[in-house]
């Protein structure tokens, strides 16, 4: 006995329900379409808050803890490490936010496009009634992006974008680098408190002792919250990649119709083939090579 959701999907798959005459051909691409950006007020605010919180951590780490430190080697090492990780985190955030996650062309469910597919008798296709597009397998419609997204995992307001086929690598790197700088900041805060308790607080910072304590406590709260949140997200994303099942597919318990691959091959599908140091770079676009994104069970 099929559930109502399965029956609805079966109806959606019937060619007779495509109704291509109701679809307007997609507009031609212009120069303004080259960069992907979602105009969602909530997502934009969340993205700005993310950057401001990182800048706040930068300020406290550099001006409150490192510059007043007497050990030059300690300041240089931790300053280069923290700023390098923070730069990679913000770069990963920008790539996750401004990369097309795998949007299906809007309004392509036209009669001409359907005829160009040369569908075989009885062959099943999907049509999204919201964006009027032929929807590939494993694609889902996002109500915020207003597009169907290939291998959509979820919509994240903190990056103001969907996490999908083309930007999942950058989202994973973003969560990893934020977790690392949060952990690093917590270690430096603990060390700074220990040193300042042993010495005179007035000599421990360029700010007054009450201001220093407040700034460090706020950074400690921020680092702890971000560490927990991003570490959980990072682990969830890695598990989703290794199991080759997106968050939506797990939530809806959709029937698996794609071939099972090894966990290592699934990692290559997202981060690129073969394994290299570019896996850790938000500036390197994944080269899938032999790692086929779609392998379906016939």
Image (cartoon, rainbow, N blue to C red):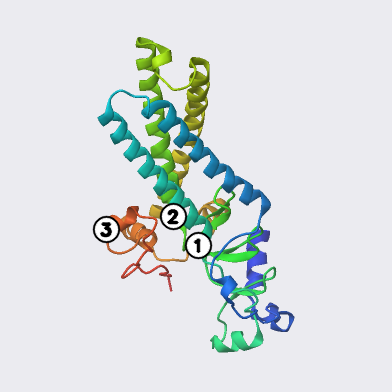
Q: Nearer the viewer, residue 35 or 156?
A: 35
Element class at badge 1: loop
- Quarter of the N terminus within the rendering: bottom right
Q: Which mark is residue 99?
A: 1
- State how far apart marks 2 and 1 are (Cα): 9 Å
Return the residue found at the far right: 22
Q: Callout 1: few (<14), some (14-19), or many (20+) C-alpha neighbours within 10 Å?
A: many
Q: Residue at x 34, y 52 (%)?
A: 280
Q: CA distance from mark 1 to mark 3?
A: 21 Å
Earlier in the chain: of badge 2 and badge 3, it is 2
Asked if the residues shown at circle 2 and circle 1 are in contact, with their CB atoms under 8 angstroms apart, the answer is yes
Location of residue 71 (image quadrant): top left
The residue at which mark 2 appears reads as 170
The disc at residue 276 is 3
* Left or right placement of residue 30 versus residue 87 in this view: right
Residue 182 higher or lower than 196, as above or below: below
In the foreground, 256 or 210: 210
Q: Residues within 10 Å of mark 2 (few under 14, many from 20)?
A: many
At 35% from the left and 21% from the top, the residue drawn is: 191
* CB atoms of marks 1 and 3 within 8 Å: no
* Residue 228 visible, this orientation: no
Residue at image point 67% right, 70% down: 131
Q: Percent from the top left, x then y, of residue 173?
A: 41, 50
Distance of label 2 from label 3 (alpha carbons): 15 Å
């Amino acid at each position: 006995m099929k559930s109502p959701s399965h029956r609805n999907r079966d109806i959606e798959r019937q060619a007779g329900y495509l109704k291509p005459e109701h679809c307007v051909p997609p507009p031609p691409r212009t120069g303004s379409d080259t960069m992907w950006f979602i105009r969602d007020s909530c997502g934009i605010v969340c993205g700005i808050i993310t950057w401001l919180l990182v800048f706040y951590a930068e300020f406290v780490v550099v001006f409150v803890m490192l510059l007043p430190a007497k050990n030059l080697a300690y300041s240089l090492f931790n300053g280069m490490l923290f700023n390098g990780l923070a730069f990679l985190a913000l770069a990963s955030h920008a790539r996750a936010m401004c990369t097309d996650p795998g949007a299906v062309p809007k309004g392509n469910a036209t009669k001409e496009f359907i005829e160009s597919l040369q569908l075989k008798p009885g062959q099943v296709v999907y049509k999204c009634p919201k964006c009027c597009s032929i929807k590939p397998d494993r694609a889902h419609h996002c109500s915020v992006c207003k597009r169907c997204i290939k291998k959509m995992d979820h919509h994240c307001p903190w990056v103001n974008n969907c996490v999908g086929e083309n930007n999942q690598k950058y989202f994973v790197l973003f969560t990893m680098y934020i977790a690392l700088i949060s952990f690093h900041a917590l270690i430096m805060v603990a060390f700074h408190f220990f040193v300042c308790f042993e010495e005179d607080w007035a000599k421990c910072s360029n700010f007054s002792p009450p201001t220093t304590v407040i700034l460090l406590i706020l950074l400690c709260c921020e680092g702890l919250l971000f560490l927990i949140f991003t570490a959980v997200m990072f682990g969830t994303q890695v598990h989703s990649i290794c199991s080759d099942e997106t968050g939506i597919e797990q939530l809806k318990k959709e029937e698996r119709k794609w071939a099972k691959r090894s966990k290592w091959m699934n990692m290559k599908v997202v981060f690129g083939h073969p394994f290299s140091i570019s896996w850790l770079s938000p500036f390197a676009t994944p080269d899938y090579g032999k790692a086929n994104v779609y392998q379906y069970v016939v």
